[in-house]
Amino acid sequence: MLTIGNNNVVIGRRQLVRRRRDLGDPRAVAGSQAIGFAYFAFGLLGRDRNDLPAWAIVRILRDLGMSEAAARGALTRLRQAGRIETRRSGRTVYYHLTDGSLAVMDELTRRMTGQAPDWDGTFHGLLYSIPERDRAFRDSLRRFATLAGFGLLRPGLLVSPWQVPLELQVPRDRAREVAAEAWELPKLAAMYRRKIVLLDRTTEKVQAHPPSGRLALRTFASTMESVFEVVVIDPGLPAELLPEDWPQLGLHGAMERFYPAIGRPAFERLCELLPEIEIAEPADVARSRALRDAPPVSGGRPASGGLPVPAAG
């Protein structure tokens, strides 16, 4: 659910951005590579930890090719937008993700894995009217509405398959047509297919010539950033509203192939980069090591598990 009141935007029970002036400031809205890499760094170190020193996050971002000024600027923008919070102990500043950021990460994970609640057959809508002088605020509203799963069916009318105050009844046999228009599903499907090709090509390159050092971490980060360009605009619709050949599950499979290929060298680089910090070994890395050390099973191929998690902790 997305509501606006007292210059606030609230998605569900999470207030992700507190002030209208933050919404109108493009620097407070995630989307730049610097912001994406910052989230990646938090994920690597453990999304639920509250003891992540600023210097560790900056060190990762610099290893990904950012200047120290750009790295610290990205953290500042995230803090100003209410995405991360800080605490100080002596001379060290520590960061942690807010509940709002964790909710967004959980929602993106849901979309990536293809999980969706059942649909009751009704589209729900949100009517809005924002004058041209507040265009920046209107654009930010649309971005946050997209993140909440809304689609723009008509100017001033956002729709969602989940409950908000305005209901739109359409014949069930036209539901997919409405969804395709509101969420531009043909365009989204084409983006998914391009990302699947990217993932498979990258996986083949990594398997043929395993990267090491900073190249491993950069390959992991840049590939994931590209994939999330499509995941973040996918509303995660129920299967009943999707085309029969919807390619999202294909992305899931490509990710399952990519994670084990890149996990070990990326984790080794992270440990090399931050020897002062205890970092939990990602599940896919631990599993690949166990499979590597175990005797071969019948047929010489290990059974595949679930989707690996590309973040420590």
Image (spheres, rainbow, N blue to C red):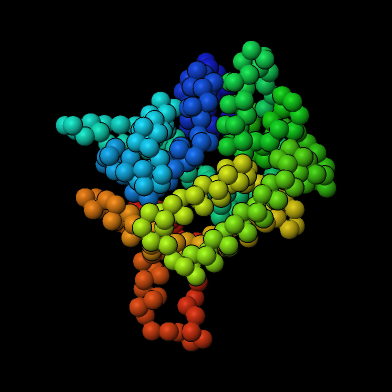
Which residue appears at 61% of the width and 54% of the height? 195
Quick one: 129 or 92, which is closer to the camera? 92
Residue 34 makes an appearance in the image: yes
Which residue appears at 33% of the width and 54% of the height? 270
Which residue appears at 40% of the width and 75% of the height? 291
Residue 103 makes an appearance in the image: no
Q: Quadrant of residue 202?
A: bottom right
Indicate left or right for 155 with 5 as reference: right
Residue 13 point in image, percent of width and height = 49, 32
Which residue appears at 36% of the width and 43% of the height? 62
Residue 231 point in image, percent of width and height = 58, 47
In the image, residue 47 above or below residue 1: below
In the rendered picture of this protein, how many numbered marks are placed on residues?
A: 0
Quick one: 178 or 266, which is closer to the camera? 266
Quick one: 139 or 48, which is closer to the camera? 139
Q: Quadrant of residue 67?
A: top left
Residue 184 point in image, percent of width and height = 73, 41
In the image, residue 170 above or below residue 247: above
In the image, residue 140 above or below residue 312: above
Quick one: 101 or 201, which is closer to the camera? 201
> Which residue appears farthest toward the bottom when viewing the image?
298
Indicate left or right for 26 with 277 as reference: right
Residue 19 point in image, percent of width and height = 48, 20
Q: Quadrant of residue 170?
A: top right
Which quadrant of the figure contains the N terminus? top right
